[in-house]
Image (cartoon, helix red, strand yellow):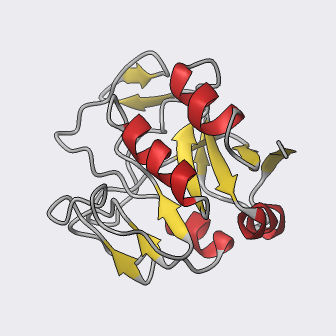
Amino acid sequence: MQIPIAPEMATKKGKAVTSHERVDNGTEEWLTPPAIIRALGEFDLDPCAPVVRPWPTAAQHFTIYDNGLIQPWHGRVWLNPPYGNQAIRWMRRLVAHGDGIALLFARTETQMFFESVWDAADALLFMRGRIVFHRVSGAPAEFNAGAPTCLIAYGARNVDALAASGIEGKLVKLK
């Protein structure tokens, strides 16, 4: 499946956006492109969904107002966690839940990656190219994600979903 991606370097106001720069748009709410969600099938819960979203990511959504970290999780979970130092808390929760798919930057050398991915996940799909996240309005950003992205599967049915998704990239089974 062809997911809209951006070239390795994109510009914003004439400046390149690379993996070493943080793009500040005044929000932490960046939406996963809807084609990725559709390719992965239906999810029961998105525990860290944006307050405003132009498309659903799951049957049930918890927003910042619900604090999805303290809510009970159920079924198949979609997780595009807030990036930064809070991401590990969300990833630990998904590891404990054991049924879902997370989208993260492929920063494979980090402590978080070792703890919640290399030592816990069932498979990864390293996506080809850099995706373009969307704003809460639904419009794609003017720049790419700034780093390579991967999808991380917990549980056999989520490994199967990655394999069947048609998303361009390389699937690596860990278990």
Image label count: 0
Residue 66 visible from this viewpoint: yes
Would you place residue 7 above or below residue 173 in this image? above
Q: Residue 93: image x %, image y %?
A: 45, 50
Give the camera-side residue of 89 and 125.
89
Q: Residue 127: image x %, image y %?
A: 70, 45
Q: Please, which residue is most extreme toward the bottom here?
A: 59
Rendered-image quadrant of the N terminus: bottom right
Q: Is residue 56 left or right of residue 27?
A: right
Give the camera-side residue of 52 and 174.
174
Give the camera-side residue of 149 and 130.
149
Q: Residue at x 20, y 58 (%)?
A: 64
Q: Is residue 11 left or right of residue 62?
A: right
Q: Residue at x 67, y 41 (%)?
A: 120
Q: Residue at x 29, y 61 (%)?
A: 68
Q: Quadrant of residue 166?
A: bottom right
Q: Residue 145: image x %, image y %?
A: 48, 38
